[in-house]
Image: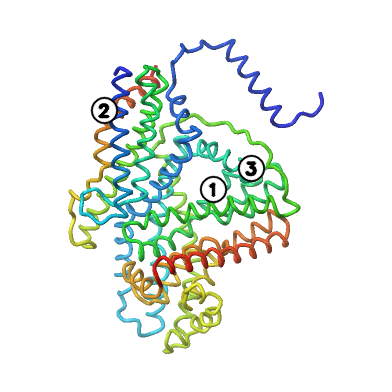
Amino acid sequence: MNLRGMGVYALLIGALCVVFGLLEAVLVFMECEIWIPRDLFGGLALIVIGAVYLSGVRELLEEKNEGISFLLVGSILIGVFGILHILMIGADWLMYLLGEVDEFPVVNALRPEILLFVAALPVIVYFIRGVELQSSG
Amino acid sequence: MGEIDADTFADRRYRTIEEILKASLRVRGRGELTISDMLDRVFLNRVLGIPIFLILMWATFQFAFAVSEPFMVMLERAFGWLGGLFGEAETPLVSFWSDGICGGLGFVMVFIFPIMFLFLALAILEDSGYLPRAAFVMDRLMYRCGLHGRSFIPLLMGFGCNLPAIMATRTIGDERDRLITILVNPLISCSARLPVYVLIAGAFFGAHAGTAIFLMYVLGIVLAIMMALLFRRVIPGLKGRPSPFLMELPPYRRPTGRSILLHMWSRAVVFLRKAGTILLGGAIILWFMSSFPWGADLGSSYAGMLGHLIEPIVRPLGFDWMGAVALFFGFLAKEIVVETFGILYGVGGEDEIMAAVAGHMTPVTGLAFMVFTLIYLPCLATLGTVRAETGSWKWTGFMVLYQLLLAYTVAGIVVITGNLVMGV
């Protein structure tokens, strides 16, 4: 993967993280029906992840290797949050099976963190392969 | 050779290591970074380091609370079934089984899952090599607040249990730094307080319960830092600058499943051992106090008498006599607070007890109760350790007094502010 391409990728995912994060945080104080959850801390977490991605964009566009650091950590963080929310969907499903909740609307449970995790998967896979190569060689 | 201080010694040692490495290793090409370099560049970043630490801790508590919920329900149902084996609690023996053992001890046992999940997440952070980086990132902030950088590890250990955390302060060389770390350590939320948070936050904050729990942990850290700063500035024997801190960061590693599960299991064993001893004892005492004189209503029981005696002290905070009894016995072990509610409310199941809690408290008093539980006193065993480690009744007594005063003040602020916001 070339560094400029990585830079554009980081810019895109970082911007999406910040936008979704702002929406999640701002919606707490607004009355409107939308699929994005109202979650102040979840939103702040996404903004931090977005900031991590965006911090590396300039270096990546200037083709400096150091910028990869931010793309790597941003992808780890979105991976952590994506997996966390998938596990939370699993827990909700178990609660539904146990009869503790009346319905299990899986579409509502699909949070932006999970979609962003899916979007960041190619980079995550790229880094996992990189780590395996580095540890084997 | 004259005596040199620890920093000069460390500095010379690293300079020598660097010289040996330069002479013996092939240097990587310019711009060639290892994965470790890349991770450290961001995790130790001056601006992003602390926010990253905070969001990872938030994710940890969300995981511990939300993902463990169905497992808690399953265990709770098992205890509910066991409690109903002998029918209605009409005789003391059946009441002892259903209300004391299954309703009290059984109810607190369900909290083994959030504790296990919390330590599963913390084990991943520790084994990956991230937690020492968190200590490094927090050092700058802590130094400014008058705490020694090495204090962070005992404070971090306090998330598990304050007792070994206080013993771990032995690694701090300077006596003043060590004493300050001991004095503020009980403000860090140990795992025993987690059941109280899970119960109250679950009763009042619904989908945001994980966030409420996370805020309790953050409040503990903030108060510990604030008190350290205050002690450093005000108490004559503790004045001065903290000594500098130097730490070696371990390499990043991919955590192994075996090590993480062992870590989690070791915490579960600690909890089970506690359940079989002090929590069982607590359940028996509480059951006896709430059931006798046999046939009397709860308010006239021994527990009721004790509660009514203490109630005037905590009434301004909005806690009733049951809350007062729970806090009183919580001094033995914090889990007993939850056990007390389980026995005194006399209802089975997490949902029913949460509903009972919601019936006895408002969201504001619930939050104040969580805050009070966080701050008011460490458990008896921790207090004994503080006495042993400081070798002084004076400092132990000082810690008890300042924590009680601080708990009352902060919980009072929560009540006043909360009522103002809610328009009560």
Between residue B248 and residue B343, name the one nearer to us: B248
Q: Are marks 3 and 2 in contact (CB under 8 Å)?
A: no
Q: Are marks 1 and 2 in contact (CB under 8 Å)?
A: no
* Subunit ID for the residue under disc 3: B
Disc 3 crowd, CA 10 A, few/some/many (<14, 14-19, 20+): many
Mark 1 and mark 2 on one chain? no
Q: How far, Cα to Cα, is label 1 from label 2?
A: 37 Å
Which residue is at a point 73% across and 59% down the rendered structure image? B392
Q: Mark 2 highlights which residue?
A: A122
Q: Is residue B262 visible?
A: no
Mark 3 and mark 1 on one chain? yes
Q: Mark 3 highlights which residue?
A: B148
Element at badge 1? helix
Which residue is at a point 22% across and 53% down the rendered structure image? A93
Residue B158 is left or right of residue A58, and the answer is right
Element at badge 3? loop
* Subunit ID for the residue under disc 2: A
Between residue A5 and residue B358, name the one nearer to us: A5
Q: In this rendering, is residue A63 above or below B174?
A: above
Q: Mark 1 highlights which residue?
A: B157
Q: What amino acid type should be assigned to the residue bearing mark 2? A: Pro
Q: What amino acid type should be assigned to the residue bearing mark 3? A: His
* Subunit ID for the residue under disc 1: B
Q: How far, Cα to Cα, is label 3 from label 1?
A: 15 Å
Q: In this rendering, is residue B179 above or below B300?
A: above
Residue B20 is left or right of residue B250, and the answer is right
Say whether disc 3 or disc 1 marks the residue closer to the N-terminus.
3
Q: What amino acid type should be assigned to the residue bearing mark 1? A: Met
Q: Nearer the viewer, mark 1 or mark 2?
A: 2
Disc 2 crowd, CA 10 A, few/some/many (<14, 14-19, 20+): few
